[in-house]
Image (tube, coloured by chain):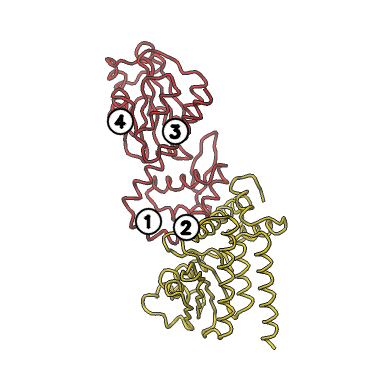
Chain colours: A red, B yellow
Amino acid sequence: MRDQFAVAEKALSALTGSESRLFEPFLGVLPVDGVSISTFGDFLPDETISASDAQSMRLDELQFDLGEGPSWDALETGAPVFEPNIRERPNRVWPAFSEAIIADDLGALFAFPLSLGPLRIGAIDLYTSRPSHLSDLNIQHTAALATVVSRLVLARAIRLSQSDIKGETDTRKQFSRREVHQATGMVLAQLGISALDARLIIQGHAFAVGRSVQEIAEEIIDRRLTFAVNENQIEGSHD
Amino acid sequence: MIDETREDRLIETFATLADTLVAGYDVVELLQTLVESCAGLFDIAAAGILLADENGELEVVASTSEASRLVEVMQLSARAGPCVECFITGSVVSLPDVEDSPLAWRRFRDSAREQGFAAVHAIPLRLRETTIGALNLLSTVPGALRQQDVRAAQALADVATIGILQERTLRESNSVREQLTIALNSRVLIEQAKGVISHSRGVSMEDAFALLRNHARSNHLLLSQVAQGLVDQTLVI
């Protein structure tokens, strides 16, 4: 199982640029019938990045349209949502979503949040057509894979936004680098994470607040913006 | 009289650089030593070395001060100013009075003026037909460099080029391009490490750089090794 997990983790990381196939490694390691990966929430548009089948796609679309459901709860609380028997013995009832899936061929539904540092990115939805449980190991693996997916999905969003405003980033690039690298060092020290993740958080934060990476880097260097770890959640705060 | 002591210092500088080249070293440390030597040898206030990245854009890899204002004036010079002119033509470009800057260089001129620089000299880092970067000498008084200063500065720039190539041979990498990328990446790592120290010690980026260098020196480690340790969080200064 551990080997399978390592394989899945590696397979995910290899899917940069082919994010629509991100569901594939999940099907290899988890006892589920369908997987979808979506972005929604504060700053990324409602979008299904990857879905294994029509049912998964439908679950995402319902939740986008209705603005409620397990994905929303997972993202809001920063914790997974488990519904081992969603139609017959639901843990929670959503007024519109529960009604909408009544005729669907659904047993269990699970949602895991996608986030990186202070950034809320989206969720992973897993379903089975008969009621079922995820083991503790399944849950651990899914949470770990969710971190890899968060990184890839955020990098994709930044990549797409940069191709929109390429001219602007090019002219800024020349002066931005040093400060951005310095700020990256500060953030990695604040959060105890890798330089790549720290850089991604700075870019993602800039994207989320609609400002340039350079401006955010300067705020970090001037200590006007710090990222602190609070009870397992990383938050950005301004002085 | 002055020339004699300066000749001694020049010999001393080349001896130091030769020692560095024979022993283990990293490119940024070598270039740092070089710009600091220039500041002591010539009648200048600041010096810096810029290398071209994969897009042909010049980046500051070493400078006598880490102050962002100094880095900025050199970056502006590399965009439209004596530095990029030197890089493109592959020959020494002297601007004895920044007030004589052509219109296209006005952003560079304003930045230089603001920081009290009156004259700038750019010396190419040449490798046969290719120019890989430039050495910049900034002075607070207007005036041209003496001919023997130009020769000495060109010799130092050549040592810098040799240093970059020598390290390339040691690493057995394939191209000058690759070697330049290593030097520039090593600078990225140092900037990140400055950020780590700045956060953990609550100091400015300049002080962070001084702490980084001191640690490397007193522990006989390469600058890039210390920087890597800090970024990987396996080392605390």
Of discs 2 and 3, which sits in the foreground?
3
What amino acid is labelled 3 in the image? Answer: Ala
Of discs 1 and 3, which sits in the foreground?
3
Chain label for disc 1? A
Q: Which residue is mark 1?
A: A169
Horizontally, is B174 left or right of A123 in the view? right
- Looking at this view, is A3 or A94 the one in front? A3
- How far apart are the two marked residues, 1 and 2, measured between alpha carbons? 11 Å
**Tags 1 and 3 on a common chain:** yes
- How far apart are the two marked residues, 2 and 3, measured between alpha carbons? 31 Å
Nearest to N terminus: mark 1 or mark 3: 3
Q: Quadrant of residue A30?
A: top left
User: Are circles 1 and 3 on residues that touch, CB within 8 Å?
Assistant: no
What amino acid is labelled 1 in the image? Answer: Thr
Nearest to N terminus: mark 4 or mark 2: 4
Of discs 4 and 2, which sits in the foreground?
2
**Tags 1 and 2 on a common chain:** yes
Of discs 4 and 1, which sits in the foreground?
1
Q: Secondary structure at mark 4?
A: helix
**Tags 2 and 3 on a common chain:** yes
Q: Secondary structure at mark 2?
A: helix
Q: Which mark is residue A67?
A: none
Q: Which mark is residue A64?
A: 4
* B2 is higher (above) or lower (below) than A217: below
Residue at 40% across, 59% down = A172
User: Are circles 2 and 3 on residues that touch, CB within 8 Å?
Assistant: no
What amino acid is labelled 4 in the image? Answer: Phe
Q: Which residue is mark 3?
A: A11
